[in-house]
Amino acid sequence: MSAAKTNILHLYRALLRELPPRPLLTTPRAPLHQRLRDFVSSAASPASAGASTPVHQPSVAEAEQLLAYLQAQREYVTLLERYNPGMGMDEETRVRLTAKRVGMDLPKEFQEGEEDK
């Protein structure tokens, strides 16, 4: 196997790792998966190397840029979740946890129909 073909297969596997997983193996592949497979098969075959087609074929450099973008997006989401832990919480929970952080407990709210126990 040539170095170029190995590089293309490595790139293909890396792109698949960055994409969200399929929920079940019985679900059909997304159009992006099929497009990636077509790219790998066309880039890996030696006959297509010299042929020029009117349709734009993505190059290996473009695929590497896409991979770098997907990796950066994954890292960005990880950092957002790490440094903004209250991002996914509702306002009441966020206020309660913020008060607890500074050493305060919020008073228990009275709700209609409750009696003091």
Image (cartoon, rainbow, N blue to C red):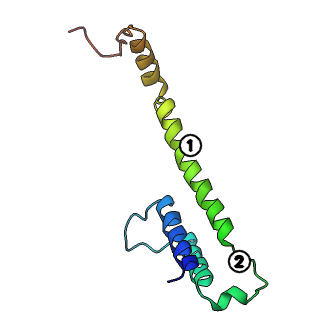
Residue placed furthest toward the left = 117
At 46% from the left edge and 23% from the top edge, which residue is drawn?
94
Within 10 Å of disc 2 (Cα), the crowding (few <14, some 14-19, many 20+) is: few
Identify the secondary structure beneath mark 2: loop
Q: Which residue is nearer to you in this view: 23 or 58?
A: 58
Instruction: Give the mark, 1 or 2, whose residue is nearer the N terminus.
Output: 2
Q: Residues within 10 Å of mark 1 (few under 14, many from 20)?
A: few
Q: Which residue is mark 2?
A: 57
Image point (47%, 34%), residue name: 82
Name the one closer to the observer, 18 or 90: 18
At 20% across and 9% down in the image, what residue appears? Answer: 117
- Across and down, in percent, residue 76 comes to 56, 43
Q: Is residue 105 above or below residue 20?
A: above
67 displayed left or right of 81: right
Location of residue 93 in the rendering, given as x and y in whole percent from the top left corner = 42, 24
Mark 1 — residue?
76
Q: Is residue 56 left or right of residue 32?
A: right
Mark 1: which amino acid? Tyr
- 111 vs 29: above or below: above
* Circle 2: residue type: Gln
Most extreme residue toward the front, as rendered? 3
| Residue 20 position in % (x across, y down) | 47, 59
Q: How many discs appear? A: 2
Residue 1: assigned label: none
Horizontally, residue 27 falls left or right of residue 75, namely left
Local SS, label 1:
helix
Q: Position of residue 38 (x, y in %)?
A: 59, 80
Rendered residue at 39%/13% (across/down): 100
Q: CA distance from mark 1 to mark 2?
A: 29 Å
Please tell me which residue lies in front, 22 or 95.
22
**Quarter of the rendering containing residue 7:** bottom right
Is residue 115 toward the left or the right of residue 63 in the image? left
